[in-house]
Image: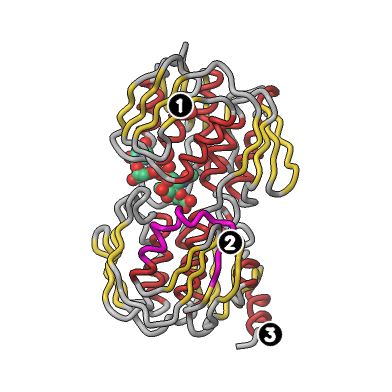
């Protein structure tokens, strides 16, 4: 079983390059399927979720040529099937973007019901509502979402809740709808803007992405393009919190500092020193950190995908903090693991009450999901003593070369496949 073996206690220091944004790439790869010409996407992250989506797209007959680990060519003209299914796609979330893409392009799509991290109930009623207002019927049949339409027509869609997935999915379908679609109360995350920019570079007419209202004028055709995915805001944020919890000094490179402000502003408030450059952000700790109140919100609020990582930092900061999760109801599963490291945290309803302790202690840990898994790794790197983190496959869904990147910052971490290998690592590694 793949595990990370970690000896904690060293500040992380140095520079690390951030990969392309997973959640932008998933939407962009689905968008690429909508053109019969070559769409070349650069800076795709080499992570499990993206690789599964690419394999799944290829299974429909669409041409997928991986030109390098970070560059792919997609051409939708060879598509054979509008049915999207395999055992892997059922376990991830981003596969459902093929629903919007295929419905928009072919007026027909059948996609296996999405899985993904078990962080809440994660309904898709807002996706369905959007598709239906565009003129489609949607149904759940034998574990598939089936969406069909005679034709799609522009509509006024007011979402009941701010949803990243529904915003991207309905935007994809509306690109080919006749006339104008107005989507209100939409998500504003950087990856929404990135998917819209890619679609526009293919000839779509989308305005307003990044605000709470998106207007789309339907087109008949999308042409080929060459497009580069934005850097991953959450990967960058994870390295910044890793620097904070280990009291280190890390510069994340290849980032868009503006996208990180929702994270760095909170870290600054806690006492971290943060310097911004054109495409890099440096975080270092040169004074005692203090507690904070954190509340997750849709962008530009504090991201739910950074909630476990900031809680790990707060667990080591003198004083009391609160962390309130407003997006997903089941995103505190890692707290029990953190408590086994000595953290003093009580969860009541959607709020974690954190009392900072001097030092976490290493132990055997299990990643409950992607972001919580990454957060536990940062906790182990900061802790006194040795830890192992299993269920690493969750982390590899969204972090490229995570262990290697942490090693390059001086982290003492190794991927191991048995207890014996972990023991060997702990014997060899210097304290
Ligand atoms: C996306 O999930 C991301 N996944 C998640 O990243 C991220 O945590 C989340 O957005 C919030 O930022 C991908 O992009 C693949 P939502 P998504 O629809 O689209 C409710 C990660 O770690 N809702 O914005 O599934 C929902 O229950 C992952 O990279 C409805 O009620 O999230 C939640 O409370 C985990 N009905 C809220 O909206 C719907 O139809 C926001 O969910 C859709 C959502």
Q: Find ligand 1 in the image and state its quadrant.
A: top left
Residue 346 seen in render: no
- Foreground mark, 3 or 2? 2
Q: Is residue 326 above or below residue 288?
A: above
Q: Which residue is mark 2?
A: 253
Residue at figure coordinates x 36%, y 77% from the top left: 343
Q: Secondary structure at mark 2?
A: strand
Q: Quadrant of the C terminus?
A: bottom right
Residue at figure coordinates x 64%, y 61% from the top left: 401
Residue stretch in magenta:
250-266
**How far is the residue under mark 1 from the one under mark 2?**
45 Å
Q: Which residue is mark 3?
A: 428
Q: Residue furthest bottom?
A: 431
Compared across the picture, whether 298 is left or right of 220 comes to left
Q: Quadrant of the N terminus?
A: bottom right
Report crowding for label 1: few under 14, some 14 to 19, many 20 or more residues within 10 A (C-alpha).
few
Q: Is residue 84 part of the magenta span, yes or no?
A: no
- Residue 141: which disc? 1
- Foreground mark, 1 or 2? 2
Q: Is residue 7 above or below residue 329?
A: below
């Amino acid at each position: 079983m793949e595990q990370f073996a970690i000896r904690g206690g060293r500040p992380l220091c140095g520079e690390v390059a951030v990969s392309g944004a997973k959640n932008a790439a998933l939407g962009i790869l689905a968008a690429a399927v909508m053109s019969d010409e070559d769409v070349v996407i650069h800076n795709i992250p080499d992570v499990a979720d993206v690789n599964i989506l690419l394999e799944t797209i290829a299974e429909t007959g669409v041409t997928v040529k991986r030109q390098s680990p970070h560059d792919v060519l997609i051409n939708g003209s060879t598509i054979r099937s509008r049915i999207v299914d395999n055992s892997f796609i059922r376990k991830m979330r981003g596969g459902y973007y093929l629903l919007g893409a295929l419905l928009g392009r072919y007026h027909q799509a059948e996609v296996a019901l999405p899985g993904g991290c078990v962080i809440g109930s994660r309904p898709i009623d807002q996706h369905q509502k959007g598709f239906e207002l565009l003129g489609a019927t949607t149904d759940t049949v034998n574990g598939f979402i089936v969406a069909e339409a005679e034709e799609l027509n522009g509509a006024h869609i007011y979402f009941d809740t701010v949803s990243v997935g529904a915003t991207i999915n309905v935007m994809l379908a509306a690109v080919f709808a006749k006339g104008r679609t107005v989507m209100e109360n939409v998500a504003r995350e950087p990856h929404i803007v990135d998917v819209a920019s890619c679609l526009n570079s293919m000839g779509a007419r989308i305005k307003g992405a990044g605000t709470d209202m998106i207007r789309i004028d339907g087109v008949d055709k999308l042409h080929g393009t060459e497009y580069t995915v934005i850097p991953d805001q959450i990967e960058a944020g994870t390295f910044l919190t890793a620097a904070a919890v280990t009291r280190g000094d890390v510069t994340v490179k290849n980032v868009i500092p503006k996208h990180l402000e929702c994270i760095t502003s909170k870290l600054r408030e806690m006492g971290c020193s943060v310097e911004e450059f054109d495409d890099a952000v440096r975080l270092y700790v040169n004074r005692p950190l203090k507690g904070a109140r954190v509340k997750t919100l849709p962008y530009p609020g504090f991201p739910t995908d950074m909630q476990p990582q900031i809680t790990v930092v707060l667990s080591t900061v003198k004083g009391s903090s609160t962390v309130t999760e407003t997006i997903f109801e089941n995103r505190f599963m890692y707290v029990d693991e953190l408590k086994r490291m000595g953290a003093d945290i009580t969860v009541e309803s959607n709020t974690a009450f954190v009392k900072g302790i001097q030092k976490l202690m290493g132990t055997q840990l299990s990643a409950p999901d992607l972001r919580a898994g990454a957060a536990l790794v940062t906790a182990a790197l900061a802790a006194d003593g040795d830890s192992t983190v299993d269920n690493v496959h969750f982390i590899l869904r969204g972090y490229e070369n995570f262990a290697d990147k942490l090693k390059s910052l001086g982290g003492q971490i190794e991927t191991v496949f048995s207890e014996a290998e972990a023991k060997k690592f702990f014997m060899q590694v210097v304290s």
